[in-house]
Amino acid sequence: MSQRSQQLGLVGSGPALPRHVAIIMDGNGRWANRRGLPRRLGHRMGVEAVKRTVRAAIELKIPYLTLFSFSSENWARPASEIDDLMGLLKRFIRSDLQELHQAGVAIRVIGERGRVDSELLSLIDEAQALTRNNQALTLVIAFNYGARAEIAAAARRLAERARCGEIDPAAITETTLAQELHTSGVPDPDLLIRTSGEQRLSNFLLWQAAYAELVFMDVKWPDFGREQLLEAVSIFQARDRRYGGLAKEVLGS
Ligand code: IPE
Ligand code: IPE
Ligand code: MG
């Protein structure tokens, strides 16, 4: 057995796998800078890392994978870089949609639609409609996504429904608020990975990641793939998730 498949054997037969892995794909620009290349090449290589990671998630039978690909704050970047990032998502959907569909991937895009060009919006609609019944993996792409805006919009919708008398404000709970988020129906992430060495959430899944295990890795996103996903999963499997309770050893004694 090769070292690689052994590694999969270990994570596959060990403690529970995460049901939902969310990744802040960071470090494309630095990956390129270090090689004297333009940032756009870092982003282009980042798409290859996305493909490797999707394949590995399917192989591992992780049911949900969320990838942060453009934040609501990324509009602060130069227009040319924003164009490159929009172009890459368009190209990814155009060239890989059939293959993702055949592999049983359901694509779901979360984030604000405003400011996203209509050509990209229709590609997103097409990808979601084509793949909606697929079962192997739900690939959630967070594009033009910001968690604070998402939570504010959910609060606004609940307030509007309360004003119309549709709901009683006293009946608003964590569950009803979560149902108004873009991620409604998607389980909370168990494992949240950020690459590139930065250790912050940058406005990603602030509500949903309340009890996610955070794993920060030094690898820059274009160098991420199956091996790095397996490494993060094995770090996750060694964690003791207490949810405010007591450690397993304490309970057992
Ligand atoms: C992540 O890489 C991709 C996006 C945020 C769109 P960056 O572009 O942030 O790369 P660094 O952080 O500048 O290296
Ligand atoms: C977070 O990375 C957003 C994405 C990965 C899409 P950034 O590079 O934009 O985050 P900051 O600016 O370092 O916090
Ligand atoms: Mg960055």
Image: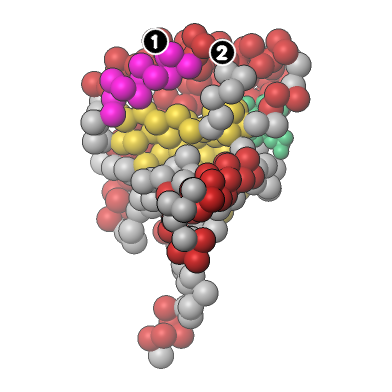
- The residue sitting at 51% across, 53% down in the picture is 162
SS for callout 2: loop
Residue 117 has which mark? 2
- The residue sitting at 32% across, 43% down in the picture is 63
Left or right position of 9 against 182 = left
Residue 140: image quadrant is: top left
Q: Is residue 170 above or below residue 206?
A: below
Residue highlighted by disc 1: 95
- The residue sitting at 30% across, 51% down in the picture is 12
- Please say whether residue 66 is visible from this viewpoint: yes
Main SS of residues in magenta: helix
Residue 140 has which mark? none
Callout 1 amino acid: Ser
Residue 122 in the magenta stretch? The answer is yes
Residue 41 in the magenta stretch? The answer is no
- The percent position of residue 90, horizontal first and vertical second, equals 48, 12
SS for callout 1: helix
Residue span colored magenta: 121-132
Rendered-image quarter of ligand 2: top right
Q: Earlier in the sequence, mark 1 or mark 2?
A: 1
Q: Quadrant of the N terminus?
A: top left
Callout 2 amino acid: Asp
- The percent position of residue 153, horizontal first and vertical second, equals 58, 42
Mark 1 crowdedness (10 Å alpha carbons): few <14, some 14-19, many ≥20: few
- The percent position of residue 248, horizontal first and vertical second, equals 42, 78
